[in-house]
Image (tube, grey):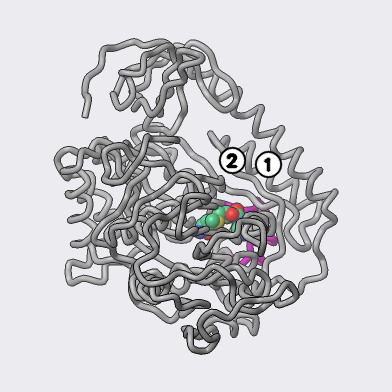
Amino acid sequence: MGSELIQIIVANQPGLPGAPRSSSAAAGEAASFAAWGQVKERTATAEAWGAGRRPGPANAGQPPETVATAGTLKTFYIETFGCQMNVHDSEKVQGVLMARGMTRVENHHEADLVLYNTCSIREKAAQKVFSRLGVFRKGRTGSRKVIGVLGCVAQQEGERFFERAPQVSLVCGSASYSKLPQLLDQLETGKQRLTGLALDTEECFETEMTRRDNPFRAYLTIIEGCDQRCSFCVVPMTRGPERSRPSGRILAEARRLVDQGYTEIQLLGQIVNAWHDPSPARLSFAELLSRVAEIPGIRRVRFTTSHPRYFTSDIVQAIDANPNLCDQIHLPVQSGSTTVLARMLRGYTREEYLEKIHAIRQARRAISLSTDIIVGFCGETGKDFEQTLSLLKEVEYDQVFSFKYSKRPNTLVEGSRDALAEEEKGRRLAELQELQRQIQVRRNQALLGESFEVLVEGYQARLGQAVGRSTTNRVLNFPGTPEDVGRYLTVKVTSAGPNSLVGARAGSADLRF
Ligand code: SAM
């Protein structure tokens, strides 16, 4: 999900060169958005600072000690925070670095170049990078590492980053990743305080090489940026305007992934179903799904994150027509109250959202549904919150990612005074999560005795358990062996908890790739 906001230390993929062991609008354009487009790319030069100058202890805002000289960047460490888009961006960044002959290392101590790919969707996520950077303060490591910050916090803070964290040499937002090779060239020659902050791009981040971390599921970006401007969300300001990749490129990448042995592909975009084909083929999103699913060798296709506004019935028809389009849809609703949805500038009402859910429920296969909810948005009354609870009861999602509203810079509601007290937000979140827990227990227990095909993604030696995932994105644990990893197996559900199922193998392996 676009909402699986987890911290990920990107794992190595076995078999790759240099890879050690595997580890693991809506209406209402407002002044706040004037910030968009004002951020200009500025590439500072080493001359501006003078070679060899060092910051004193009180010199916050001075150039860092971490100075590279030509050809010294041989190893890199990268840590990723946030959504799948960030994870996949990091995979592509690693491809760029490896294509330069650099080797990935597992901890920052061994790295010449340390990169943090950041998330700013909520305040807490944004703070993480500053705590990481604390390690590299003057005198703490004594190294001459180059430190770079990528992603949403980089874009949001821009050049202010150098004041807050003078140990940083590179600040680059995702809309400027296509300039990374040039920025790396400059870092290699000892230049510092480099930025890639332009947002007015029409380019997507295309790489010759991508170092994929998950040996089973390959991410494939089809659209970058976001034009939605939901009033709570920082993404349009940090990822720039929407850029769709041409269908030909997407299909060619999907075929290459099959050639490399992947059988599951997840199409990615902040608003994946806002994708439109800029090529003369002019495929619709639903047609693209079918074309990817038709590629011989592809066994599972997922896509995330869909926006209700662009969710059309032809997507359900495509799932009906192509058994390898997974029976799983993530459709963030954010609130069950039409009043709150209007204030969020989501572009749909509660009733319109429920009509889409109804269309999904008419599909030939039972489609698993998940969503994102924000509780305690500015001005959310007790009644509004009750409506969110009633929506949960009505839809009966299989999974809900729920968050307390977090005020974000440059969003339309940043200055709003009707924010709820943290304590009340926490109370509402707990109530909502308890309700959803009960729904999930009930829904999962209804699956007892049913069999699912799972792709085995892991093995827990301590428990002797294999961990597989169904097409509906359910996690199933069952007694297995390390050899099961990578296989498609049939597993029968024997017990059920709120978040996962336990099962027993019901069929023999039918494919190993
Ligand atoms: N682009 C997707 C969309 O609009 O549906 C998802 C974007 S975001 C990475 C994932 C989720 O984070 C959102 O669906 C929303 O529930 C949550 N989120 C975004 N901004 C937030 C904020 N300011 N406070 C709390 N949660 C937020």
Could you classify mark 2 by the number of other residues whose Cα lies within 10 Å: few (under 14), some (14-19), or many (20 or more)?
many
Amino acid of disc 1: Ser
Amino acid type, residue under disc 2 in the picture? Val
Camera-nearest residue between 476 and 14: 14
| Residue 137 pos. (x, y %) | 66, 62
Q: Quadrant of the C terminus?
A: top left
Measured from the top left, where is residue 279 in percent x and y?
A: 21, 70
What residue appears at the point 34 percent right and 49 percent down from the top-left corner?
Answer: 219
Residue 307: image location, x then y, percent:
47, 57
- Region of the chain picked out in magenta, as a range: 333-345
Q: Which mark is residue 237?
A: none
Left or right: 38 with respect to 95?
Answer: right
Q: Residues within 10 Å of mark 1 (few under 14, many from 20)?
A: some
View extreme (bottom): residue: 48
Disc 2: which residue: 400
331 vs 48: above or below: above
